Image: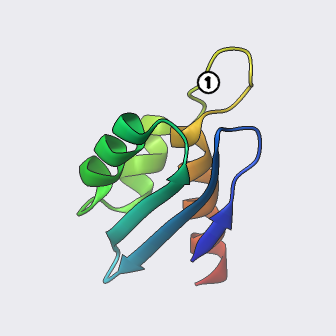
Amino acid sequence: MLYKTQGTCSQFIDVEVENGRISHCFFHGGCQGNTQGLSKLVVGMTPDEVIQRLDGIQCGRKGTSCPDQLCRALEQLKHEA
């Protein structure tokens, strides 16, 4: 799934879930070191684990963040399944 982010420096998140676990995660744009680290950390986790840990994280006064937008993408994937 290619998810268009809202309110963050990254523009898109490319995320895939296979057999109930995140198999691929890549942020297009954003703070490269942070998004690369986040992507590597979530691979192998279930979408629910990621949502439980990262939902609601804010970046400054934006009201959202790249981790929070990843949760939005995973929620959308769950609803599409």
Q: Is residue 19 above or below residue 52?
A: below
User: Residue 55 occupies which quadrant of the picture?
Assistant: top right
Q: Is residue 54 above or below residue 40?
A: above
Q: Residues within 10 Å of mark 1 (few under 14, many from 20)?
A: some
For the residue pair 5 and 30, the one nearer the viewer reads as 30
Please name the residue that numbered disc 1 is placed on. 58
For the residue pair 48 and 39, the one nearer the viewer reads as 39
Residue at coordinates 41% horizontally, 43% vertically from top-left? 35
Placement of the C terminus among the 4 image quadrants: bottom right
Residue at coordinates 56% horizontally, 40% vertically from top-left? 66
Residue 39 position within the rendered picture, expressed as x and y whole percent measured from the top left: 34, 52
Residue at coordinates 60% horizontally, 73% vertically from top-left? 2
Residue 7 position within the rendered picture, expressed as x and y whole percent measured from the top left: 76, 38
User: Residue 77 occupies which quadrant of the picture?
Assistant: bottom right
Residue 22 position within the rendered picture, expressed as x and y whole percent measured from the top left: 34, 68
- Relative to 62, 49 lies left or right: left
Residue at the far top in the pictured view? 60
Placement of the N terminus among the 4 image quadrants: bottom right
- Relative to 54, 46 lies left or right: left
Residue 73 position within the rendered picture, expressed as x and y whole percent measured from the top left: 61, 61
